[in-house]
Amino acid sequence: MAEFWNAYTETLPREKLQNIEFSYFKNLFSFAKSNSALCKDKFKGIDAGDIKTFEDIKKVPFTYKEELRKWQENVEPFPYGGLLGVDIEKVSTFRQTSGTTGRPVYVPETYESWQWRIESWCHILYMAGFRPKHRVFLPFGYNVYVAFWEAHYAAEKVGCEVIPGGALSTEGRVNKIIELKANAMCGTPTYLLNIAQEATSMGIDPKSLGIERALGAGEPLPEATRKRIEATYGCKMFDHIGSTETCGFACTCEAQQGLHIVEPFFLVELLDRETLSKEVAEGELGVIVITPLGRRSFPVIRFNTNDVAVKGPSTCECGRTSLKLMEIVGRVDDITKIRGVLFSPKTVEQLIRAEFPEIVEYELVVTREDIMDKVTLRMEADAKLGKDEVAEIAKRLAERHKIKTNLSCKVTIEPPGTLPRYDLKAKRFKDMRGKH
Amino acid sequence: MDEIRKEIENIEKSAEKLKSLAADNNAIKKNAEILLTFIYILKFITPAAE
């Protein structure tokens, strides 16, 4: 049995958790309808009293990101518009989304909603084994984005010591980790690998940094990437999922068999991709629809995240009873057809991390020439390798890509240091079809 | 858990009282409000399961 952050809620039987979430959903729905202009307008035909059973929740329409944007454009009060659920004078912190898919959404947090998010994040950190003995290094540029502010405050609350690693170069961060003997870290998987690469180029074995625990965010963490980070640092690597709109809502435990949803903070539905009306069965792919159940500053009801995950069981050797997501497959938008073949960029990430440790960075570009889709895999190899070795890797990569994806691709070799590096969300898949 | 919930309610009553007693003292009022924020969290993480 694992240690729990909240032994009461984390081990409640499913039926009881569902009852609590149903009750929380109704409360939030009622609150949102009275206090948020968006919800007042959107749900005008439905009253909380109409939601009589857990199944009735499915009658409530989804909230989409595009609506959040629309309700902020030229809508008072500035800058939150119709999304605000409280008096604007109660807002204590501004956050915004990264704007990867369009205009950023501005997110208001009150002292209460922020503390609620942090409490939820304490579950995440505790599940990932962060304890008061850990000195946690947070290598990110503290700014308007939410990543990893929650980790910072939650780590403090859990009892860890936090080292804010902002405004430093990657080399500076390696030096700070060594100087202060940090033994835990949070970061995007990509950036954790970049730090390790930087350490290696400084003549430092990443294992000697002494990192015991790492928590990833912002990108999917394929099994191969997790194992590579664990092997590189000699640490245990955990995954979590969340966003600015929804908060961090699920994390892997020591068993490393899926991500536990932090219940009853969140009602997470996994719905079939075709009709978005039915909960998928265990082992099936579903779109994640999420309602943060206690955040009143920015009430979001049934937010369609556009993320796709495999539904897991609600049993785990750690003893938690929360529902699990077995695998985050990626964005609905990223799962696409190329030459009629269903393709997920995560397959390529998994292939490269598992079989090509010599590749330090890559980018996948899909273009259309006449009526034919073309896939180009741009790779950057370890600078220490010779020309012939790199050419051999490129040849092998093209073969393995064909086997893994059923798609042939052109592999190009890029000079060291030319492909973009990412501190936050990596954007390695570029679908350029229809853009010219 | 019932005893814990009862205690949370007691603290809530005290914090509300503190807030009203300190209506003209910003520092005490704000700290009482912060207590109430954590009461909200405490109630959220100790729901009655029936």
Image: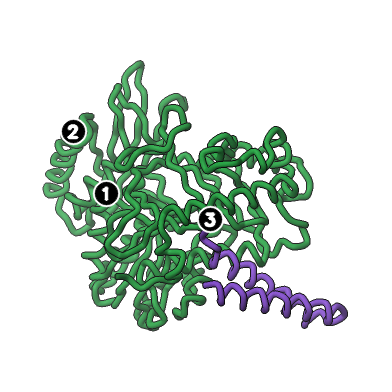
Q: Residue at x 76, y 40 (%)?
A: A74
Q: Nearer the viewer, residue B9 or A144?
A: B9
Q: Residue at x 45, y 66 (%)?
A: A123
Circle 3 residues within 10 Å: few <14, some 14–19, many ≥20? many
Relative to residue A416, is residue A375 depicted above or below?
Answer: above
Which residue type does callout 3 highlight? Answer: Ile
Q: Position of residue A135 (x, y in %)?
A: 40, 79
- Residue A367 numbered mark, or none: none
Corner quadrant of residue A227? bottom left
Q: Quadrant of the N terminus of chain A?
A: bottom left
- Residue A380 numbered mark, or none: 1
- Residue A402 numbered mark, or none: 2
Q: Are marks 3 and 2 in contact (CB under 8 Å)?
A: no
Q: Identify the residue under disc 3.
A: A20
Chain letter of disc 1 in the image: A
Q: Nearer the viewer, residue A390 or A426?
A: A426
Which residue type does callout 2 highlight? Answer: Lys
Q: Secondary structure at mark 3?
A: helix
Label 1 vs 2, first from the N-terminus: 1
Q: Which chain is green?
A: A
The residues tagged by marks 1 and 2 sit, at their Cα atoms, a distance apart of 19 Å
Chain letter of disc 3 in the image: A
Chain letter of disc 2 in the image: A
